[in-house]
Amino acid sequence: MLSLREIQPQKNEVYLDNNATTPVLPQAIEAATHTMQLCYGNPSSSHITGIKAKYILETTRDLVRQVIGAQSGQVMFTSGATEGIQTAIISSLIAAKSKVNSVKKPILLYGATEHKAVPESLKHWNEMLNIGAEVIAIPVDERGILDMDFIAKHVPNALMICTMIANNETGVYQDISLLEKTIRQHNSDVFWMVDCVQALGKIALTISETTIDYAPFSGHKLYAPKGIGILYVRDTAPFTPFIAGGGQESGLRSGTENLPGIAALQAVLTLLNDKDDSTFKSSAQLANYREQLTQTLCEAFPEIVFNHDFSCSLPTTINFSVKGLTSKDIMDLFDAAHIRVSAGSACSSKVTGSFVLDAMGKPKWQSESAIRMSFGPATTQEEITTACTAIKQAVKALQSSCLILSDTADNSNLGVDGLQQWMYDNGCTWCYVDQRTKECFVIDLAPELVGKFETLVACQGYQVVAALSTHQHIANEEHVNMIQALLHTSNTTCDALGWPKNAELISLENDLTVEAIKVGDKVLARVAMPGHTQNSVAYLLGSPSNQKLLAKDIAFAFTGDNIQISGLGRCDHQDGDASALYQSLQFINQVIMPDTLLCPAHDYLQLFNTTLELEKQSHELLSQALDGELTEQAFIAEITARDKQLPTSDFNQHCGVVTAFSNVIEVVHPNELVSFIEHHPNTVVVDVREPHEFDAYPDDVIAGKKMVNIPLSQITQFVQQHKSEQSNHTYVCICRSGKRSEAAAKTLQRNHFENIFHVPGGFALLNGN
Ligand code: PLP
């Protein structure tokens, strides 16, 4: 395990994720440290040490009152905004319980773009407290502004309404006085909570002049440490303590107060309140920072779209999408360049949109590829200048990787030759390039990756010889049109799966003659492979000799959904056929080698490729079928019984059934990497991130050893090229967090490479880079 001291920021880190959390100001650190070292008393103790602590507590409370304009009402310290939100909701719902029967159809209203803490808590406590109200989202317009007509119509039935001042993903702020008028005109006693988390320090507040009942705040969004928050409660608002016990905070919230956090908050608010101090910047200055950043972004990404209207957004948040780039592409690039931003949507292999942008009616691609860049009200000009320089530098790496087009970037030396796998929602797009002849083809191209493919083609001047699908439900009508547009062809020149009508003939190992097209010095042959669907095909890529494509010369077999990694395709779709699958498996077994790399249409396990040999080892049904130990009838019966048990709607199980695969990978912990390299001179440190990440920051040396870039997207090509070599190398795979390096190491080990390690925690936990 790494010691705490070994966990450090990266060199030249540019932190642009202040809406998630801010760094802690030095004055706040000093205040917290001072309190821990010298004023560590318990504010409830009546001795002098306690009195001092109590003084810090109460003077901070007074300061909070000044800053948020709460001359009346209660101000209590909490652990953060989520606790404040719970407290407000529980207090409201317990009080509303008595009203439930007098309201015809009781509802709980919340803004559709609220932080998840709000709707989730509403739903949770509505259920726990047996309120039985309907929880309804208030729609927003395309700018993210709450629909006042909707509120006017529904608020008479509302027990509680929850809104926010400023949104955490977009910075869009609401007109609180218009909101108040609308709410109060139609329901003078509905309990109203306003989440003020993103507004503190950015928008002037005078809470007690409003009829807001509850207002939660969070210290860690304004340069105080995590674990300290504030809840304002209006004088007339009902209150039930969320935490009972020793009666601290006048009985509102028990538990010994977080005095170091409170002292830190005091230090921050003191600076905020000090007109002569320049730590906190004026709105004009913050708008100027935004201008500098947006200009840099526009120059870097000519295809950029901003996802919110700056005229109703805080200047500190910039939310954008770039056509042709997923949020993962940009996140990975920026992280590699030591720039921290966040994805508007969850950044996992499963692509999800941002519910905030969805609520604003943004197109799906914008929502799915959104990036949030946020600075804080204490950000300095120096930080913005550094950020702009870092963004420009990072984007150069994107241009030279052909992920975006540029007139100036030198990408003549693009290191892609051979096969790449691009993932989208567990679906595999296979793109093959022959760098010498500049010919390429693509198989099962996800519609979402068309832009990426087109950019690559335009950037490198490739000639697309085919854009193919392995089966019909991948190739829906929209898909076929897209493919034809890519190839500048029509359905007179290729079929529904994109196969060109002018293909030549070639014979396979079993002397069967099939159609094939030329790609560089290789051929791509098409073979029928019904089973998962009637029209399923497989494509075989290899080097022909004398008009024959022998099994030993086939490098890759693109098997669609019939053979997957650690599983077989389902046959219970409309035109699936288990008998045909049995025959297809027998056929493919005759025309490829046991160790020919199979490239499936889905990769649920992040293992990239497989072989018949590996599948037979992990899949008894397949090995019995191929070794003649199972009759066709028995195979059909097994597949049919298996398919019956599968959910029809579960996406993960949609096209095939895979069983989990685990092989244990040896690890080298980040703090041991240098000495590991010193003790194993044959070590090759393999950075498995994508080329644009590898190039984004010049840190390709570890312990004097130059790193080698084998991008995860090219791992199948690497396996194919090196699988038969005798190697005395020790490969240590590394990536940003350890996830991709583990996947790469598993794939290599599964393909019989030896001496494979990976670095858990990756560059994130590696010191000194
Ligand atoms: N509300 C908003 C708008 C937020 O941005 C956040 C934090 O992301 C929260 C509530 C939750 O705050 P905390 O982390 O203090 O619980």
Image (tube, rainbow, N blue to C red):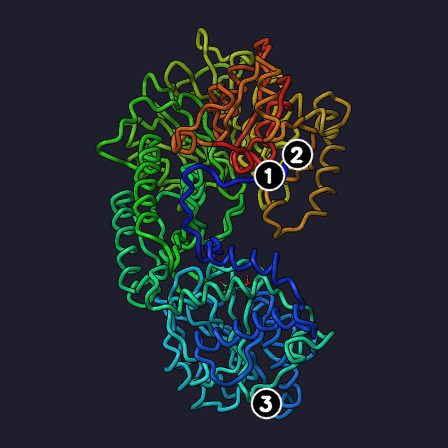
Residue 633 drawn at (x, y percent): 74, 33
Closest to the observer, 568 or 126: 126
Tell me if 159 is positioned left or right of 183 in this view: right
Question: Mark 1, residues whose alpha carbon is within 10 Å: few (<14), some, or many (≥20)?
Answer: many
**Where, by quadrant of the figure, is residue 317 drawn?**
bottom left
- Residue identified by numbered label 3: 104
Image x and y of residue 10, in percent: 47, 38
Which residue position holds label 2? Answer: 567
Q: Which residue is mark 1?
A: 604
Q: Nearer the viewer, residue 539 or 731?
A: 731
Comes first in the chain, label 1 or label 3: 3
Q: Secondary structure at mark 2?
A: strand
Residue found at the very far front of the displayed protein: 48
Mark nearer the viewer, 1 or 2: 1
First of labels 1, 2 by sequence position? 2
Binning the other alpha carbons within 10 Å of mark 3 as few (below 14), some (14 to 19) or many (20 upward) gives few
In this image, 478 relative to 619: left or right? left
Q: Is mark 1 within 8 Å of ligand 1?
A: no
- Residue 91: tell me if it is visible: yes
Q: Give me the C-alpha separation between circle 3 and circle 2.
A: 54 Å
Structural distance between the alpha carbons of marks 1 and 2 = 10 Å
